Amino acid sequence: MAAHTHGGRAKCLQRLVRLELPVPRTIALSFNAVHGIAAGDMPDMEALLAPFDSEALLCVRPSSEDPDWGGPGAVLNIGMNDGKFVQLSDRLGKVAAAELYLRFVQSYAIHVARLDPDMFDEVSDDPVVGLGQSLRAYEDETEEDFPQQTAVQLAEVLRSMARAWEGTTARLLRQAKGAPADAGLGLVVQEMALGLGQGECGSGVMQLVDSQTGARQITGRYLSQSQGREALSGGAGALFLERDPRGPSLEELAPEAFAALKSCTELMRGKLREEMQVEFTIENGEVYVLDGVRVARNARAAVAIAVALAEDGIIAREDALMRIDPRALNELLHRQVDPEAARDVLARGVAASPGAASGRIVFTAEAAQAAAAQGEAVVLVRRETSPEDIRGMHAAVAVLTERGGMTSHAAVIGRGIGLPCVVGASQIGFDPVRKQLTLPDGRILKKGDTITIDGTNGEVLAGEAPLLEAARDESFQTLMDWADLVRDIAVRANADTPADAEVARNFRAQGIGLCRTEHMFFEADRLTVMREMIFADSSEDRAAALDRLLPMQRADFIDLFRIMQGQPVCIRLFDPPLHEFLPSDRSGMLELAEALDLPLSDVTRRVEALGEYNPMLGMRGVRLGITVPEIYDMQARAIFEATIEASREGAPVVPEIMIPLVSAMREVELVKARIDAVAAAVRSASGRDFTYRLGVMVETPRAALRAGDIAPHVSFLSFGTNDLTQMTYGLSRDDAGRFMSAYVKQGVYPEDPFHTLDVDGVGELLCIGAERGRAAKPELVLSICGEHGGNPESIAFCRAAGFDYVSCSPFRVPVARLAAAQLAVKDRIA
């Protein structure tokens, strides 16, 4: 018997029987048998009933391959009829017998005869009276007597459950949970251990851990004179299991039964190598184990359980690593909306950055900063964010945008700083002028209204939803330690600020794989100097303005180098087009004219002159570095001077300098010559020697195709898969969110290529670039630094392609570390 032929419940019960636990007599029907029953091919009922005592009552439970796929509800007390009611009345008492019969009649009527449950609303609470009323209601509705033969009752229950599983609604529901369309159902027929009677009788559930924290503690409930899982909703009558100051317990009521039950549960944990929840019945003081299921758990509990099982020697450390879904770690790293809480969903968008937070709506970065200064929690709402919104994003507790996808500005920055973010919420009507939002159901939210952003599920919720705190506890740290012992690909972090670097260091990233230097220029004091540089008319004037930025950049790099303590830091040279640093509205231009003491007409002309039809494909990256070389000269000097300063205190710093948006070898030659010249000048002026590595960010298809030309001039190639995907598809990553869900639903793309690396198209470019680059220079270091770097499937691709490391947002580093470890473990097993 196996889970894929008879289902998980049947397989578990078989193992419990082999462990000689007190399991009532049980027969399992296979997937094939149940499929046949649904088609009308009934088994020999006389042979099926032969192993059971003729006086026994039976129950039927579903047994699907995965318990998460669900199935029809269990039916208890099959075999109850008028004769058994009389017999059990003598043995158990008339009330208990009536309760057993009544429960079966109503269950049979609703689930087998498919009668309306409302017909039992007026039934008396007195079981004896209610039984007579329910039987009459059944007979009136069906115009036939309630079936009295056990074989007939059981056959109808089996047929009903089999057909229910194969119905359209049930199939769609389980497919939504990940089940294949042809998933099978097994059925388990089990002799009843009655939870009602004269002695101590009842039922309950027990587990040895807390489902929320994974802490070792006996949890569950027991209810006297009950069946099934009634104890979990038994109200005041339900008892605790072990002694508890909050109320009476099973341990006090029936200590021998409690000890036997605890012993059974601990044996299951050791032998089944899993934390199990036991469903049990006590009949006249004797314990019966009816079922065992894997304990339900959230991500925090899953980690604690896996680590505890490994530390107790029940499973291997590698097994513990394999039991945790890497993406589930997001629940531990960020606050989450309480899954038990009611949700008033206002709108949905792209789940761009996990976590949840509540705050008042603001529409500008300035308003977010002002509110944060007063200690108020705010949600920054924008059509889309730009680099000048950085400070507002840092001040907000969450971000919501109308436009954008997984690699839009808001999404990338949100993941980098651990900020919950929902982007591409195009169903919402954004009106930044009136400072209000019109929701799909017609409701209107205004500035100051409170909402909750659930970046894990991509939902915008009304009001302040209950949140669960992040839980990076000792078990989490232990699991990460084990992951680092087995993984064989390095994991770095994308970090733009000292705060990002601190997070990366705390998550034990092996360096910074991408530092975007342009974000350092949007502080108020620096932005003015940048604008002066843009408006300068000569190389000398530009250099003079940049000289004022030099000490600021140097200080930033010194902080990064010191925080990373000798770990590699890869700094991308200036990338965005210059227009991003200039105002786009008249009031902003007037303000700039006053700051620079220039006529408004001059400012307007310069802003218009820098405008581009498609700025992301225009004067940016290396193109800007070649045409306005003073910017890269200043940055290189800042890097080298910071290298010298940071190296005074500890291990020598070896910075990595990355040239963005390269498409031709000559671009690399030109930039390399100037950087080498700056390095020579700094060495000469300081009298100190240092080394550095120069590399290219491969984000154009041509750079990947011509990697063999570029490789001899550089030490590394780092693939920027965000822009590379954008350019390969000819698809705007900021606008794709508007139609991507429709594309995925209709099978145009299997997944959003900005969310999951396209291994067929973009992946082929990565392989070509890697092969041609290493053919020209075997020691070439290869990596990816786009957002795909934290995606488990992308890590598998990079590992197979021989990449040295992946780099991702700081809060995705643990996810990447665990995913990389699981890949290494799978290789060992294979």
Image (cartoon, helix red, strand yellow):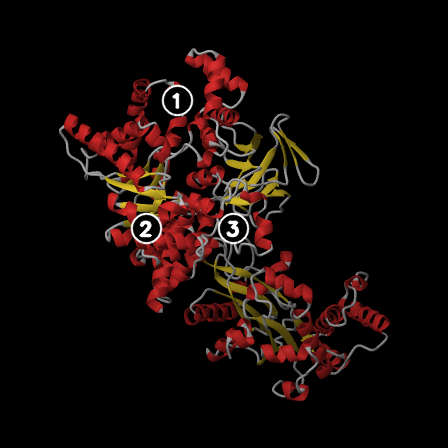
Q: Which residue position is annotated with label 2? A: 805
Direction from residue 451 to residue 592 in the image, left or right = left
Quadrant in the rendering for residue 36? bottom right
The Cα atoms of the two marked residues, 1 and 3, are separated by 37 Å
The Cα atoms of the two marked residues, 1 and 2, are separated by 36 Å
Q: Is residue 372 visible?
A: yes
Please name the amino acid that badge 1 sits on: Ile
Direction from residue 6 to residue 699 in the image, left or right = left
Circle 2 — which element? strand
Direction from residue 630 to residue 167 in the image, left or right = right
Q: Which residue position is annotated with label 3? A: 752
Q: Is residue 677 above or below residue 247?
A: above
Please name the amino acid that badge 2 sits on: Tyr
Circle 3 — which element? loop
Q: Earlier in the sequence, mark 1 or mark 2?
A: 1
Q: Which residue position is annotated with label 1? A: 534
For discs 3 and 2, the disc positioned in front in the rendered view: 3
Q: Residue placed at 53% from the left, 62% from the top?
A: 241
What's the mark number on residue 491?
none
At label 2, counting other C-alpha atoms closer than 10 Å, the crowd grade (few under 14, some 14-19, many 20 or more) is many
Decide: marks 3, 2 in contact (CB < 8 A)? Answer: no
- Between residue 178 and residue 199, name the one nearer to us: 178
The Cα atoms of the two marked residues, 3 and 2, are separated by 23 Å
Q: Earlier in the sequence, mark 1 or mark 3?
A: 1
